[in-house]
Image (cartoon, helix red, strand yellow):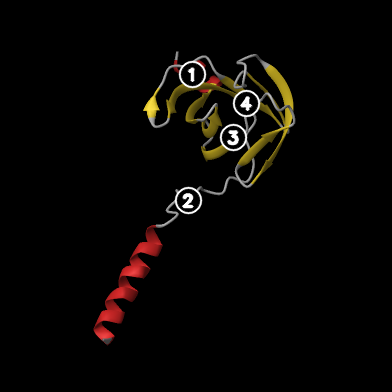
Amino acid sequence: MYLRLLIIFIVCIGLSSCVGDKKQLPHIEKLEDGKYVVVGAKRNGKLTATLNSGFYEIKRDSAFTNLTQTIDSVGTTFIYKNNQIIHKDPQVLSFIVSKMTSDTLELNTELKGFEFELYLVKESTIENQE
């Protein structure tokens, strides 16, 4: 009887540790100013070229980008908190920042029911490599 309860308990603990197994995001205190260009993107986990002309320019608490619902270039302010970028203009997509280094930026968003992962590089980095 005790052995059976112990086995059930161990199985429940094992299963509960798998539930909600989301990728833990690194804490990114603030966004680094600069113009970032899309160098790669995935839609629902598969590579896509749809957003290859995308850019996202950060200047303090404002952004200029064409990563919008209509792909038009828009300037807007945003709030950045807990790895989330929430724009004042509802046409601009909201993002989750999954990674940021001095020259790269990785963003996640949803658009029309599709999950997107965007890989951006600081424009100055690209110019220095040419």
Q: In the image as oriented, which residue stretches furthest toward the front? A: 1
Q: Nearer the viewer, residue 78 or 8?
A: 8
Q: On screen, 64 above or below 98?
A: above
Q: Earlier in the sequence, mark 1 or mark 2?
A: 2
User: Which circle, 2 or 4, is nearer the viewer?
Assistant: 2
Provide the residue designation for mark 3: 95
SS of the residue under disc 1: helix
Q: Residue 35 appears at what percent x and percent y?
A: 60, 22
Which residue appears at 63% of the width and 33% of the height?
A: 94
Residue 85: quarter of image = top right
Q: Residue 86 appears at what percent x and percent y?
A: 68, 36
The amino acid type, in three-letter code, at marker 1 is Ile
Number of other residues with Cα within 10 Å of mark 1, as a class: few under 14, some 14 to 19, many 20 or more: few
Q: Earlier in the sequence, mark 1 or mark 3?
A: 3
User: Which circle, 3 or 4, is nearer the viewer?
Assistant: 3
Which residue appears at 57% of the width and 20% of the height?
A: 55
Check residue 24 in the rendering and tell me which mark sits there, or answer none: 2
| Quadrant holding the C terminus | top left
Q: Earlier in the sequence, mark 2 or mark 4?
A: 2
Number of other residues with Cα within 10 Å of mark 2, as a class: few under 14, some 14 to 19, many 20 or more: few
Number of other residues with Cα within 10 Å of mark 4, as a class: few under 14, some 14 to 19, many 20 or more: some
The amino acid type, in three-letter code, at marker 2 is Gln
Q: Do callouts 1 and 2 mark residues in contact (Cβ within 8 Å)?
A: no
Provide the residue designation for mark 4: 34
The amino acid type, in three-letter code, at marker 4 is Gly
Q: Going by the image, does 102 lie left or right of 34?
A: left
Q: Do callouts 1 and 3 mark residues in contact (Cβ within 8 Å)?
A: no
